[in-house]
Amino acid sequence: MDKIDGLVVAAFTPMNEDGSINLEMVEPLYQYYRQNGIKGVFLNGSTGEGLSLTYNERLRLCEEWGKIVDDDFKLIVHIGSNSLNEAKEFATHAGKNGVDGISTIGPFYQKSSTVEILVEICAQVAAQVSDIPFYYYHIPVLTGINFSMVDFLEHASDKIPTLAGLKFTDSDLSEYNLCRVFKNGKFDMLYGNDEMFLAGLATGARGFIGSTYNLFPGIYQQIYDAFENNRMDIARELQVKAIEFVKVLDKYKYNAASKAAMKMIGVDCGASRLPFRTLNGSQTVSLRKDLEECGFFDYALIAQ
């Protein structure tokens, strides 16, 4: 299994103003990602409001993306569910639609009591598509599932033949580093904390999955290049700038503000679905002003 090097975007789900999914925007969104150096998409995850979508909506999005992506562009689909059988069905469906990887969280309502149970759940899901790489999605801040990921790898490495690695969305870089070197660096450790991108690089990360790559992937590519060229002063300055942008978006509630900002740069991903709220007109005007003041539009990549 080849490891991913570069940026994979946690893709938005394009929606109409009534909150229904807008499949017609998938192609323009894909072209926008390609124009801006993105290596692949992570579909139906947190940024994509995946767990707020219906069963059929998740299937339709996977099918649409599967139709349009080129062979050199990674398509990883999140197939997690509180229902193990539903996750298995999502996995089987993904396998029929040309995906390059599947990923799942563990059930987060009735949680696994031990890491062994979590591994068994993942093993059953992964077994539905025996030729597709499997990534466990570690995001404890949202799932409340916070087993040691080293323990997870120790138990899963012999039980999940297709285990490719982890989508590691957490700030615990000591844990990340232990996972990175586990079994001589066998597994693909995709780092998912955008505000700690540079710290991830310094810890050895080379593949990243992030939400803010929708809006300003160029700043992370510049951080990567500066780090590779031993220009840590530039890398640190750019990381601070990226954090400032995130703080502005967070001020207006991240998902709604990010979709509004996407529209400002020419990629209309539409409304958000409850429990997220769509920004109203005055909020959007205020957001634009704050983004202008912090220099966001100097770094955001305008759709061609």
Image: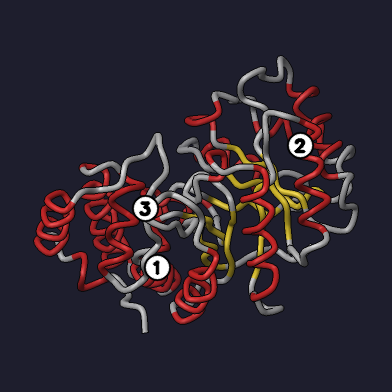
- The circle on residue 86 is 2
At which x and y percent is residue 114? 73, 18
Instruction: Residue 236 in the image: state x and y as whole percent.
Output: 29, 59
Disc 2 and disc 3: Cα gap in Å? 27 Å
Q: CA distance from mark 1 to mark 2?
A: 33 Å
Asked which secondary structure carries label 1, the reply is helix
Q: Nearer the viewer, mark 2 or mark 3?
A: 3
Q: Secondary structure at mark 3?
A: loop
Could you tell me which residue is drawn at 67 percent across and 78 percent down? 72
Q: Kindly give the residue lying farthest to the top in the view shown.
A: 113
Q: Earlier in the sequence, mark 3 or mark 1?
A: 1
Q: What is the three-letter code of the residue carrying label 2?
A: Glu
Q: Residue at (51%, 56%) from the top-left corner? A: 21
Q: Say if 270 sits above or below 144 in the image.
A: below
Quarter of the N terminus within the rendering = bottom right
Q: Residue at 28% across / 41% down in the picture?
A: 253
What color scheme is it? secondary structure
**Figure label count:** 3
Q: Which residue is mark 3?
A: 271
Residue 181 visible at all: no
